[in-house]
């Protein structure tokens, strides 16, 4: 009896809490059922907290991320639908019209937003609470000088040289190679060279291993418990920041000792501009995400599709051989050479359509606004996705067919093909990625022919497409 009496206050609190939650729920339900609330996009929120994140992740792991979108556009609306991803209420904008609205509505209706899982895994803890708009603005402020045409032209001989060295070391000695890990090795080494002047293979590897773990958990259920993908991602991100901090501090001391005033890489540029080490570390991680994972994915699937379509391989080969024949022995590629690689770029675009390196990007509603007759409340998150257009027959007839000619002439309809986004937030590294991809394909196809070891290899999206076996191919001289 005494025990029951002692528990009475707690039981009373539980009863009050239960009644309060029930009343709030009934008021909420009554309000919206009587038309007094906003006309939200159709859809469902899924499970508490995790929403439909597991559905999205599973569709991606099964190699059909577009199914998550098409199932809901068919059931709810082809223009916009509601869901809950990564613990957030979210409106998924679909089609070319949805892309155009979000791109043109930047800083008017929507602003940049990064999921907590990305910020927690990759950014210094002191910066996690900073607004995504603030971090994104800082990130872009340091890119334009680095990505100016005159700067990019200086990188082309480096890209060409590093592609040659990489192929000679990691491809030429073997009859069979795995394309995906090797393409990641090349793009990561190039980023280390251009961003941080790091060339030592052992030092590059110190960054590469944890970086792979960190990116694997970026779009995952943000449950930070031992053994989860997100937990491994957070730990790897911490290790990356430690290594970066040591490198940045070393560079800072060298600048102070030498009195150097002209930067030789991106890190030095930011140091000379007065940024602190933590800020620089955050930015460099962002640059690696944008420049490394996406380009290595594109290279991998270009190689894959060229193996599937001999006629297309031959056209790319002839285009690249014409350029090679026009050059003297040992003469590196230059800007004008890459402008001639028009058909190779069409093949690249068609590859990115069918195997998109990036799924889309997030935004946050700055105010209540209406789209397609539905209200998107302030604070809701928005997402544009390539999976609503890339295989949509309204934009790409016979969408499963690999046809680079789609990108000849005027190309696809506006806003239907947006691998680099659009509007004010278009990826500023688009031209960097183009040059990096073309320089590598030039060196590869002028040296080798190849065939797949497993033509039916499974593809998973984590979050970019990844061949489960690393795309093993057999090599022979071109």
Image (cartoon, rainbow, N blue to C red):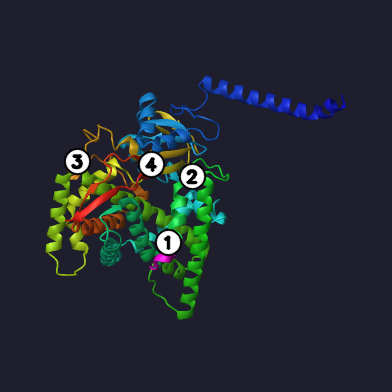
Contact check, label 4 and label 1, Cβ < 8 Å: no
Q: Is 44 placed left or right of 5 in the picture? A: left
Say which quarter of the image contains residue 149. bottom left
Numbered disc in front, either 4 or 1: 1
Residue 64, how many percent across, how many down?
A: 35, 35
Dot placed on the residue nearer the N-terminal end, 1 or 2: 2
State the residue at coordinates (18%, 61%).
337
Give above or below for 111 relative to 25. Answer: below
State the residue at coordinates (48%, 79%).
257
Is residue 266 in view?
Answer: no
Q: Which residues are magenta?
A: 198-204
Query: Residue reaching furthest right?
Result: 2
Residue 234, how many percent across, how many down?
A: 53, 51
- Label 2 neighbourhood size at 10 Å, few (<14), some (14-19), many (20+)? some
Residue 205's mark? 1
Tell me the distance, in whole angstroms, between the alpha carbons under discs 4 and 2: 18 Å
Q: Disc 4 on helix, strand or loop?
A: strand
Say which quarter of the image contains residue 141. bottom left
Tell me the distance, in whole angstroms, between the alpha carbons under discs 3 and 2: 35 Å
State the residue at coordinates (43%, 55%).
286
Tell me the distance, in whole angstroms, between the alpha carbons under discs 1 and 2: 27 Å
Residue 175, how many percent across, how many down?
A: 25, 55
Residue 461's mark? 4
Q: Nearer the viewer, residue 17 or 328?
A: 328
Q: Nearer the viewer, residue 297 or 362?
A: 297
State the residue at coordinates (28%, 35%).
391
Kindly identify which residue carries mark 3.
403
Q: Is 380 placed left or right of 356 in the picture? A: right
Tell me the distance, in whole angstroms, between the alpha carbons under discs 4 and 1: 24 Å
Dot placed on the residue nearer the N-terminal end, 3 or 2: 2
Residue 115's mark? 2
């Amino acid at each position: 009896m005494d025990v029951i009496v002692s528990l009475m206050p707690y039981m009373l609190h539980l009863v009050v809490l239960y009644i309060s939650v029930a009343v709030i729920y009934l008021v909420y339900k009554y309000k919206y059922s009587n038309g007094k609330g906003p006309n939200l996009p159709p859809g469902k929120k899924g499970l508490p907290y995790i929403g439909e994140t597991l559905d999205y992740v599973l569709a991606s792991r099964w190699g059909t991320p577009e199914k998550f979108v098409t199932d809901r556009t068919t059931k709810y609306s082809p223009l916009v639908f509601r869901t809950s991803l990564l613990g957030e209420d979210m409106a998924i904008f679909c089609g070319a019209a949805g892309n155009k609205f979000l791109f043109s509505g930047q800083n008017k209706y929507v602003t940049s937003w990064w999921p907590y899982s990305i910020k927690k895994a990759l950014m210094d803890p002191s910066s996690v609470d900073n607004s995504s708009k603030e971090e994104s603005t800082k990130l872009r402020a340091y890119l334009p000088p680095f990505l100016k045409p005159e700067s990019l032209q200086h990188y082309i001989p480096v890209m060409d040289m590093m592609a040659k060295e990489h192929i000679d070391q990691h491809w030429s000695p073997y009859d069979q190679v795995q394309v995906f890990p090797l393409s990641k090795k090349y793009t990561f080494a190039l980023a280390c060279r251009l961003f941080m002047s790091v060339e030592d293979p052992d030092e590059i590897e110190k960054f590469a291993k944890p970086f792979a773990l960190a990116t694997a958990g970026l779009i995952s259920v943000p449950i930070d418990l031992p053994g989860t993908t997100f937990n491994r991602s957070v730990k790897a991100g911490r290790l990356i920041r430690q290594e970066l901090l040591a490198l940045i501090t070393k560079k800072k001391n060298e600048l102070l000792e030498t009195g150097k005033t002209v930067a030789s890489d991106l890190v030095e540029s930011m140091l000379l501009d007065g940024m602190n080490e933590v800020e620089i570390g955050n930015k460099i991680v962002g640059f690696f995400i944008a420049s490394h994972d996406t380009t290595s994915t594109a290279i991998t699937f270009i190689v894959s599709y060229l193996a599937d379509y001999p006629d297309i391989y031959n056209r790319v080969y002839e285009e690249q051989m014409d350029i090679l024949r026009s050059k003297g022995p040992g003469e590196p590629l230059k800007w004008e050479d890459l402008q001639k690689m028009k058909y190779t770029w069409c093949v690249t675009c068609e590859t990115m359509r069918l195997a998109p390196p990036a799924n889309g990007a997030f935004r946050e509603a700055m105010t209540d606004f209406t789209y397609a007759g539905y209200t998107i409340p302030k604070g809701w998150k928005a997402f544009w996705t390539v999976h609503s257009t890339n295989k949509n027959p309204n934009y790409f007839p016979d969408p499963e067919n690999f046809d680079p000619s789609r990108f000849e002439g005027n190309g696809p309809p506006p806003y239907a093909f947006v691998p680099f986004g659009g509007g004010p937030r278009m990826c500023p590294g688009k031209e960097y990625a183009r040059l990096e991809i073309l320089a590598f394909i030039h060196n590869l196809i002028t040296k080798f022919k190849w065939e797949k070891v497993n033509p039916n290899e499974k593809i998973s999206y984590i979050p970019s497409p990844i061949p489960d076996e690393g795309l093993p191919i057999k090599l022979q001289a071109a």
